[in-house]
Image (cartoon, coloured by chain):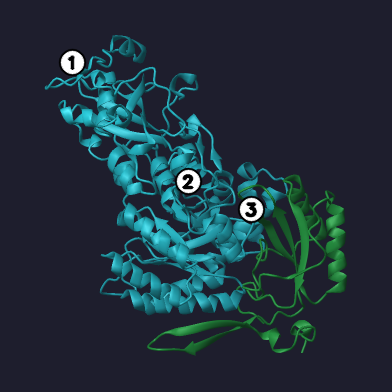
Chain colours: A cyan, B green
């Protein structure tokens, strides 16, 4: 196998003679100016790191140049019309190729893009280039966008989260601890009235939020208006019963933008503090709903429904860390980022990388967490990450140790499935949470002492004891498919 | 008497735990001081969930780095307002945070009457909700906080 260094040495370079360069016919991408090994990215360039798997016999440098070409200006043949434009600056430039450590056949390729290529404030436009045609390109068996560095000049064309986690906390009057939530179960089939019962019990019992599931929209068993009306009665009743601000993510996802705006307006009219959308609505809808949320003082929750189809497999697709960066720019206040310890896919370090992308003011390169680039967020508001899926009170120490305070911990089954009822389930989670935060602040090592801290708290809280008896031993230990591939040397560092 | 599982207002970081002792409060204050927060003592007779501005018992103690001093201020407030809600709040001035980092209740009235939920029936099935503190029927300064 050819190493990155040999590949670079053997690569034919850009043809500088314009008569040869623009002669009709087919050239190698690397001869057309898409491979520039001495290129130093400008401070206004976007830099992408692709993981590529070239077809047998395809040179990795040519494959990298092809990725640069197909994600910017190239077509399969030379076109004279290039010469009508400042085409050199429009070409994306692959400037480095390295073999992926311990993974034969795969290469990391670094590609730089000039800022003129992307419309200001449009994730749809950026993604149409970066993940548009290129992922179907025949000379590649597979390609994955591993990470992206977005220049401050482009970051500043986005307004980002409409609320941000700091202002969210101020509005909710909840500080210094993770927020607690639960997704209403069963996902499908409850009438509006039955559904509201679950909301009321969970919130009165001690949760901060309840949540519609991603596929609850407006089906025959529960019309959306019915759901919103009953849910808001439950939210307000629970708020009066506890003296706390409470919320329930009303999912306004629908078939058209007009329907989504109508649902969001109704949620606002009923006094909800938060509405919810699904990732499957697409980038343009996400940015439109973000504008709407900003105009209407609304927290915007995003469920990442569908992401696993392209984020999970390491050889092909888009890493969730890239999706998370785009979502922060597009402007959501909450996003699901995984649990690491629950039922859904996630290597703990890789998942922590997603959390950092949501919450950092400046994300530093951190290869074990899959973060290949520094990223300056330019004071863009922070997103509240949401941990949801197969977690329970017995894991509280692990969750707080992994993710800290700025996270919504969502215990759906772990609340509603409690043997003592939904309120008891909520109490168990809230007591476990408060006991763990208190112990951590007192200087206890919760990673090792966590189970003991929970057992002691359960002595004054029988619902917590019941929760530990029911789920204390449940864990989901499967090998993650998406751990970071790196070697701790400058080799893969940009 | 409030009917939620704790029987009391559940605002703040630790309302579901047994009341913190002064030693336990000191440990929390020290945690905040180590992280560079400034502590503040606030009190109110109206703990409505959207009553943001409780009265300040003095200004935030920006230059006080000694937990005992913060505890002393808190206990002065308890002596002055034994039947009020009192909370400790920690402010973090770090850029991009610049907000409250910790908040928990350290004093409550003996009886917590809680809140009424008023439903104003509006057009169609719409309802306008108002959460009303039972104590605010009396004027400020004459509320007695739950004592009839």
Q: Which mark is residue A436?
A: 3
Nearer the observer: mark 2 or 1; the answer is: 1
Q: Nearer the viewer, residue B127 or B97?
A: B97
Q: Mark 2 points at which residue?
A: A156
Where is A8 relative to A480, above or below?
above
- Could you tell me if residue B115 is visible in this image? yes
Report helix, strand or loop for mark 3. Answer: helix
Where is A313 relative to A468, above or below?
above
- Could you tell me if residue A416 is visible in this image? no
User: How far is disc 2 from disc 1 in space, using C-alphas?
Assistant: 41 Å
Dot 3 surroundings within 10 Å: few (below 14), some, or many (20 or more)? many
Residue A481: image x %, image y %? 36, 36
Circle 2/circle 3 CB separation < 8 Å:
no
Report helix, strand or loop for mark 1. Answer: helix
- Left or right: A332 as drawn, with respect to A3: right
Q: Earlier in the sequence, mark 3 or mark 1?
A: 1
Residue B104: image x %, image y %? 70, 62
User: How far is disc 2 from disc 3 in space, using C-alphas?
Assistant: 38 Å
Q: Mark 1 lies on which chain?
A: A
Dot 1 surroundings within 10 Å: few (below 14), some, or many (20 or more)? few
Q: Mark 1 points at which residue?
A: A20
- Left or right: A398 as drawn, with respect to B69: left
């Amino acid at each position: 196998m050819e190493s990155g260094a040999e590949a670079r040495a053997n690569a034919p370079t850009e043809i500088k003679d314009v008569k040869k360069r623009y002669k009709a016919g087919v050239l190698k991408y690397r001869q057309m100016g898409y491979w520039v090994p001495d290129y130093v990215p400008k401070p206004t360039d976007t830099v992408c790191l692709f993981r590529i798997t070239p077809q047998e016999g395809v040179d990795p440098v040519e494959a990298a140049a092809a990725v640069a070409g197909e994600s910017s200006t190239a077509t399969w043949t030379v076109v004279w019309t290039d010469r009508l434009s400042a085409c050199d600056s429009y070409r994306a430039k692959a400037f480095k190729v390295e073999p992926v450590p311990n993974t034969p056949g795969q290469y990391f390729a670094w590609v730089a893009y000039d800022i003129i290529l992307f419309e200001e404030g449009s994730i749809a436009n950026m993604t149409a280039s970066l993940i548009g045609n290129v992922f179907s390109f025949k000379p590649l068996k597979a390609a994955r966008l591993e990470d992206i560095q977005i220049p401050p000049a482009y970051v500043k064309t986005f307004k980002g989260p409409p609320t941000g986690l700091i202002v969210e906390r101020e509005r909710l009057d909840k500080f210094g601890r993770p927020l607690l939530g639960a997704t209403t179960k069963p996902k499908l089939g409850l009438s509006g009235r039955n559904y509201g019962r679950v909301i009321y019990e969970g919130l009165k019992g001690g949760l901060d939020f309840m949540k519609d599931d991603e596929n609850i929209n407006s089906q025959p068993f529960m019309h959306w208006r019915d759901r919103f009306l009953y849910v808001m009665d439950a939210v307000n009743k629970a708020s009066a019963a506890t003296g706390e601000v409470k919320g329930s993510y009303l999912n306004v996802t629908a078939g058209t933008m007009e329907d989504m705006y109508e649902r969001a307006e109704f949620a606002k009219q009923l006094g909800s503090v938060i509405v919810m959308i699904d990732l499957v609505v697409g980038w343009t809808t996400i940015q439109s709903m973000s504008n709407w949320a900003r105009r209407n003082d609304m927290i915007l929750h995003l469920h990442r429904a569908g992401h696993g189809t392209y984020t999970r497999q390491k050889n092909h697709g888009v890493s969730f860390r890239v999706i998370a960066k785009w979502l922060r720019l597009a402007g959501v206040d909450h996003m699901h980022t995984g649990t690491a310890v629950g039922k859904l896919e996630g290597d703990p370090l890789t998942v922590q990388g997603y959390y950092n992308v949501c919450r950092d003011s400046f994300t530093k390169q951190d290869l074990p967490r899959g973060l290949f680039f520094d990223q300056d967020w330019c004071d863009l508001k922070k997103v509240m990450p949401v941990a949801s899926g197969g977690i329970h009170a017995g894991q509280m120490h692990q969750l707080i140790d992994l993710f800290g305070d700025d996270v919504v911990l969502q215990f759906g089954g772990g609340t509603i499935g409690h043997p003592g009822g939904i309120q008891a389930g909520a109490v168990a989670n809230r007591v476990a949470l408060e006991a763990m935060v208190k112990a951590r602040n007192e200087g206890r090592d919760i990673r090792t002492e966590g189970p003991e801290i929970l057992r002691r708290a359960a002595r004054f809280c029988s619902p917590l004891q019941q929760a530990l008896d029911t789920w204390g031993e449940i864990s989901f230990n499967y090998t993650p498919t998406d751990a970071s591939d790196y070697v701790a040397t400058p080799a893969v560092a940009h | 008497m409030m009917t939620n599982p704790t029987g009391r207002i559940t605002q703040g970081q630790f309302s579901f735990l047994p009341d913190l002792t002064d030693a336990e409060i000191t440990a929390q204050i020290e945690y905040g001081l180590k992280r560079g927060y400034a502590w503040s003592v606030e009190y109110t007779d109206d703990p409505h969930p959207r009553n943001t501005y409780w009265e300040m018992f003095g200004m935030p103690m920006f230059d006080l780095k000694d937990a005992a001093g913060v505890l002393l201020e808190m206990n002065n407030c308890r002596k002055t307002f034994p039947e009020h809600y009192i909370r400790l709040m920690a402010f973090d001035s770090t850029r991009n945070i610049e907000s409250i980092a910790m908040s928990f209740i350290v004093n409550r009235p003996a009886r917590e009457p809680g809140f009424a939920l008023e439903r104003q029936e509006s057009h169609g099935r719409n309802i306008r909700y108002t959460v009303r503190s039972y104590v605010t029927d009396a004027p400020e300064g004459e509320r007695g906080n739950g004592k009839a």
